[in-house]
Image (cartoon, rainbow, N blue to C red):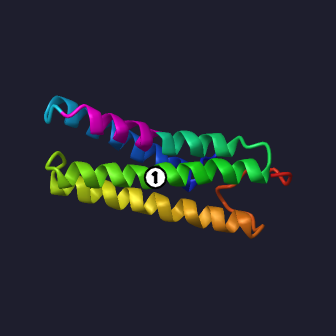
Amino acid sequence: MREGVIQVKSYDFASRIVKAYRYLTAEQKEFVLSKQLLRSGTSIGANVEEAMAGSSRADFANKLAIAAKEARETRYWLRLLHDNAYLPESAFASLEAQCSELIKILNSILLTTKNGKPSQDSPSDPAV
């Protein structure tokens, strides 16, 4: 099965979030905010995967909407960690840009789905 762009990008982002979490806990000794970042940042891809197995177009859109909300939450935690000197500028800038890109892609897929047009990342089943 060929993975869609959003699947690949959300998985890659989740991997980077796991690495950031390791850094934050090992080097910065920050455990509370970093756990929030880990949960929301890895949840994006998990919800994208659930969306791909959606039983209907509405189910697909609902899971992607949750993924978009998780991405926005992740961006919040990234900003908070950065603004309180836990994340270096270079790491923050890169992660924040990647997170913002995910939000844009998810919003685009959601808009396409709501307008009834097929998306390259939506399930190919015509019932969806």
Amino acid type indicated by mark 1? Ala
Determine the secondary structure under disc 1: helix
Say left or right for 17 vs 52: left
Q: Give the number of marks.
A: 1
Locate the N terminus by quadrant. top right
- Work out whether 113 lies above or below 13: below
Task: Residue 116: say if magenta.
Answer: no
The foreground one among 26 and 118 is 26
In the rendered image, is residue 118 in sight?
yes
Say left or right for 57 vs 6: right
- Work out whether 65 lies above or below 105: above
Task: Give the main secondary structure, helix, strand or loop, of the magenta stretch.
Answer: helix
In the rendered image, is residue 124 in sight?
no
- For label 1, the residue is 71
Say left or right for 46 vs 110: left
The foreground one among 87 and 4 is 87
Question: Which residue is painted at 20% across and 34% down in the image?
Answer: 30
Task: Residue 36: say if magenta.
Answer: yes
Q: Which residues are magenta?
A: 30-42
**Few, some or many residues within 10 Å of mark 1 (<14, 14–19, 20+):** many
Q: Residue 4: x, y in percent? A: 59, 52
Q: Residue 47: x, y in percent? A: 58, 42
Q: Residue 74: x, y in percent? A: 39, 49
Q: Residue 24: x, y in percent? A: 21, 36
Question: Which residue is painted at 74% across and 64% down in the image?
Answer: 118
Question: Which residue is painted at 40% across and 56% down in the image?
Answer: 99
Question: Which residue is painted at 40% across and 47% down in the image?
Answer: 13
Q: Residue furthest right?
A: 127
